[in-house]
Image: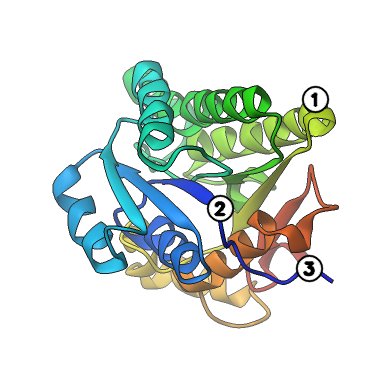
Amino acid sequence: MAHIDLEGKVAIVTGASRGIGEAIARTFAASGARVVITGRKIDALTPIAESIGKDKAFAVAAHNGKEQDCAALVASAVEHFGKVDILVNNAATNLHFGPLVQVDMPAWDKTFDVNLKGYFWMCREVAKHLQSRGAPGSLINIASVAGLEAAPFQGMYGMTKAAILSMTKTLAFELASSKIRVNAIAPGLIETRFSTAIVQNETIVDAVLKKTPLGRYGAPDEIAGGALYLASDSASFLTGHTLVIDGGMTVS
């Protein structure tokens, strides 16, 4: 039986300067992996890398919504640690809160660049690297329950997350022969800076908690545990799956 550890593995975690990404990076490092943490601002990443340990963590500033940055990020990870085995696509943005028909196109374009194109570019670059090595790997896309059902006032964000789930299934099918597994996680409401506007709105939170059987919102570490499982050899027969971690919200 496989044990849940990542000894000898190298992982890239995008959007790792805080919240879910930081929690995943720390969990992976504590489980034996070396981690490449990335975000737009190196000043936010450096203290995290230092607290994990310079031998275990490497910080790289990169814009997930720019194709050249994604390619350069993977190249830097390979140059620093010699290889990449695991990718966690977590970096995301949500630039519109309101009716979908009121979205302006600049916000639309930027959201799709970061949330969808960036995920694809990162998956493509890591997959190409793994195939060049003839090595197995695990690609994990952080989606959202907003991609599983209607997402009132977050429709544009929900659309990108729904597309991520579709992309995950297609890549899982196409990359299986290369022994590259591709899975997704769909978190429910998680308390992070990203979700501050929702968590601090009593009306919205009450509505969410009423339809959440566990009666609370989640914490980043609760998503990190799922990512650790998907990244590890314990999930060696799992691909094309969306792991929903939402306190039961989508089954209520």
Which badge, 2 or 1, is on the more N-terminal residue? 2
Checking the image for residue 9, the label placed there is: 2
Residue 44 location in percent, x, y? 19, 52
Position of residue 43 relative to residue 82, above or below, is: below
Query: Is 80 situated left or right of 180 in this image?
Result: left
Mark 3: amino acid: Ala
**Residue ID at (46%, 71%):** 30
Decide: marks 3, 2 in contact (CB < 8 A)? Answer: no
**Residue ID at (28%, 46%):** 59
Residue 40 location in percent, x, y? 25, 38
Which badge, 3 or 1, is on the more N-terminal residue? 3
The residue indicated by pointer 1 is: 174
Which badge, 3 or 2, is on the more N-terminal residue? 3
Position of residue 114 relative to residue 200, above or below, is: above
Q: Nearer the viewer, residue 50 or 146?
A: 50
**Residue ID at (63%, 22%):** 132
What is the secondary structure assignment of the residue under circle 2?
Answer: loop
Say which quadrant the N terminus sits in: bottom right
Residue 175 location in percent, x, y? 77, 29
Checking the image for residue 2, the label placed there is: 3
Total count of labels: 3
Q: CA distance from mark 3 to mark 1?
A: 25 Å
Q: CA distance from mark 3 to mark 2?
A: 15 Å
Mark 1: amino acid: Glu
Say which quadrant the C terminus sits in: bottom right
Mark 2: amino acid: Lys
Decide: marks 2, 1 in contact (CB < 8 A)? Answer: no
Crowding at dot 2, Cα within 10 Å, few <14 / some 14-19 / many 20+, comes out as: many
